[in-house]
Image (cartoon, grey):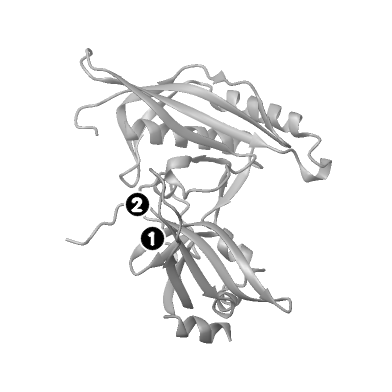
Amino acid sequence: MENAKDTFYVTLRNRLAALNPNRVITLRGVQRPGILAEEAEAVVAQMPADVFVLRWTALNADVQLPYALAQMMCEIHYTTGGTQANQGLDRGRALEEMDAELLAILTPNCAQKMNFTQTPSVAMGTKVFWNEPQFSPLTTQRERLTRIAKIAVLAFQEQGEL
Amino acid sequence: MADALLRAGGGTVVSLLVAPATGDSSDAGQLGIDAPNFQQLPLSPAIFRKVRVAMQEGQLAQYELLISASAVQQQVSALQLTSADALFDTSAGVEINGAQFLIESRSVSESLGQIYLYRLLLREAHALLQTAG
């Protein structure tokens, strides 16, 4: 399942870098596309703004098939306060831009599963695929607008895969 | 004066964990596969002690770390940062006697407009301690 999660993150990251190279974040001294896996970074008091944060939650497995089919729920959190140039009054537009970017990078809804524990990464035998996102209602906390998109990510557990 | 008081109070050396000078931009570095290789910046003198609070069920123990402002300033200068805030903002935690702690909050003590002490509120990190062999 870890390979599926890694593949999902790297796929979205690469698509975001191509779609909007200006959406970046500097983490641990490295500037990178503005998307991160929450569980692979240091804990923070508040989610960073204007980036996509992947949080893995539910897990279901269908073991009645030749290969177990794992379904993992990925919550993508994103929040914005707009831009300083507009004193934050463009926060609605900024969130809308992130909505559109997220929809764009989720298409197409599949990717070749990769094993990133090896260098270079190795293509595996099956694909990772995911459902359409379910967007939560917007939540407003003072000037910060936040939304969560839930995506069910599915992948077969290949033989010998952890 | 603050340094002398911290030393007299059992001053110790603690390490602030900050991102390495050369970051890991690989896929493995972003997926939690590679170790982050945080730099350990020594800060001394410092006093480490448990915070006395009435504990409740499920509440994590908290600790307090008092650090000399001169030690912090040395590291700020060495890393060519703009302020101590920048240093603490980029840090991932503190290592004390081999145990890692996360920074919950920080405050300063001033005298005549000069900061002489940093006070960090810490809690134990839950990361598993792995021993060699």
| Residue at (34% x, 70% y) in the render | B97
The image position of residue B107, as x and y in percent, is 61, 64
Would residue B112 appear left or right of B43 to someone viewing this image? right
Q: Is residue A10 above or below residue B101?
A: above
Q: Is residue B130 above or below residue B79?
A: above
Is residue B25 shown to the viewer in this render? Answer: yes
The circle on residue B100 is 1
Q: Secondary structure at mark 2?
A: loop
Check contact, mark 1 vs mark 2: CB within 8 A.
Answer: yes
Structural crowding at the residue carrying mark 2, measured as other residues with C-alpha within 10 Å and reported as few (<14), some (14–19) or many (≥20): few
Give the Cα distance between marks 1 and 2.
8 Å
Residue lying furthest front in this view? B54
The disc numbered 2 marks a residue on which chain? B
Q: Is B77 placed left or right of B49 in the picture?
A: right
User: Looking at the image, which is closer to me, A114 or B81?
Assistant: B81
Q: Quadrant of the N terminus of chain A?
A: top left
Mark 1 chain: B
Residue B42 in sight: no
* Earlier sequence position, callout 1 versus callout 2: 1
Helix, strand or loop under label 1: strand
Looking at the rendered structure, the kind of residue marked 2 is Ala
- Residue A98: x and y in percent read 65, 30
Percent across and percent down for residue A97 are 69, 29
Q: Residue furthest left?
A: B133
Classify A41 as above or below A114.
below
At x 48%, y 20%, the residue is A109
Q: Which mark is residue B127?
A: 2
Residue at x 38% of width, y 43% of height: B57
